[in-house]
Image (tube, helix red, strand yellow):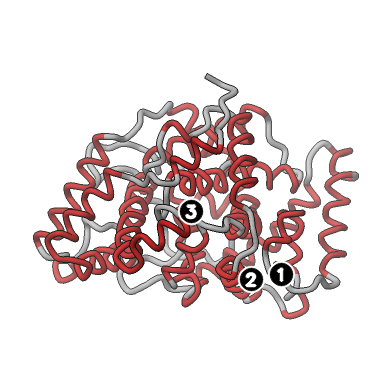
Amino acid sequence: MSGRTWTDAELDRLRRVADPLADGIVDEIFAEGEITAVRRLLRHLVDNDHPLLVEPGLALPPALLAAVERYFERSDAELPTFDPAMVEAGERVFELHGPEILMTLCCYSLPASYTAKKGVHVLAQTKRLESNPKRRLIETTQMVVDVMTPGGLELRGSARTHGKGIRSAQKVRLMHAAIRRMILHADGQAWIDAYDAPINQEDLAGTLMTFSQVVLDGLERLGAPLTQAQREAYLYTWRAIGSIMGVRDEVIPVDLAEARALTDTIRRRQSARSDAGDVMTAALLETMQSSVPGLLRGLPATLLRFFLRGDSRYLALPPGDWTRVIVAMIHWFTLVFDRLAGASRVSRALYRAFNRRMIAAFMRVERGANRPDFAIPDHLARSWKVPDQPASSSS
């Protein structure tokens, strides 16, 4: 029923709940091969685009591969039923506003997640964001492209043949379980006492909201023309993705009003300054700064402030510089000139100049020997006018 809200007691309980399906598989792996086997599983998931379709020399040992097979079978058995028309409408929103969505992801969604005083410690613990921030940012962005591209959520009979978005979401779910086991093996009850269960249901729900509700909020701040139906379709698509990734139905909002209520509630409960959040923010800014000319080095931090507004106080951002004038002018165009024209053409053109440069920079970064470089489907590249598109990636 629409209008649902979440109490502190309910969310406190969900902070002790993780993901029994994926955790059960990793528990089996741990029982057979201890933490070394779990580490090998995580490395396999990181290094390979599809964990079940790899060259013979790169395959996991038989027992470990069998456990991965069992995971995908169990995950497939719980896949939600999608409304194809709603998913198609959500994908259409991504096609129309993809560059702005990817910009919002970098400048709003990710830094918003760094303000979570407890959940952000998982990101810092993995070290990958800190040691190779650009690759991690690219992998997150690639997952968004995978799940929001037409056909990405298509069910085709098995984990080997589903749409790329389904397998990406399923793989991330198993990675979460492996990270949980590694954290608990290292820190045990001390971690739970300090931060609750690693990647728990409240943190998963908060992350889901950063990819859906926060993105919609960011698009509104950019002046992107979205109808109510488009917003609902975009949220619906991410609700489906959340189910695939192990988020419980009880903490997945059914409509835009609930999404706003959940986002605001988690933000009230979890937002605070932390050393881990500052480390993650510094890594993100360094990655974004490498994609802009030196004179615009301050632009990423300015954009973070523009999107986060008051919540920027929870992150260590460098002092503001002259790029505030650029963002203020663009925002003025959005509020005045573009509103008179009925669409935010000018501001979108200016933002897309930044977005195209960032996407082009992503395409030049290698993700690993066994994984394809960052790529977007050809029809999206043409629609967004992205230069230097690599070989076709429409699968």
What SS does tag 1 mark?
Answer: loop
Locate residue 129, reporting x and y percent: 48, 70
Q: Quadrant of residue 185?
A: bottom left
Locate residue 320, reporting x and y percent: 81, 70
Q: Tell me the residue that label 2 is attached to.
A: 285
Q: Which mark is residue 317?
A: 1
| Of pointers 2 and 1, the one earlier in the residue sequence | 2
Give neighbour class at mark 2: few <14, some 14-19, many 20+ (Cα, 10 Å): many
Q: Amino acid at mark 1?
A: Leu
Q: Residue furthest top?
A: 1
Locate residue 109, reporting x and y percent: 60, 53
Going by the image, does 338 lie left or right of 352? right
Task: Evaluate whether residue 385 shows in this view.
Answer: no
Residue 309 vs residue 291, the one in the foreground: 309
What SS does tag 3 mark?
Answer: helix
What SS does tag 2 mark?
Answer: helix
Residue at 59%, 65% in the rendered image: 277
Q: Amino acid at mark 3?
A: Asp
In the rendered image, the vertical position of residue 217 relative to residue 303, given as above or below: above
| Closer mark to the observer between disc 3 and disc 1 | 1
Determine contact: label 2, label 1, CB under 8 Å. Answer: yes
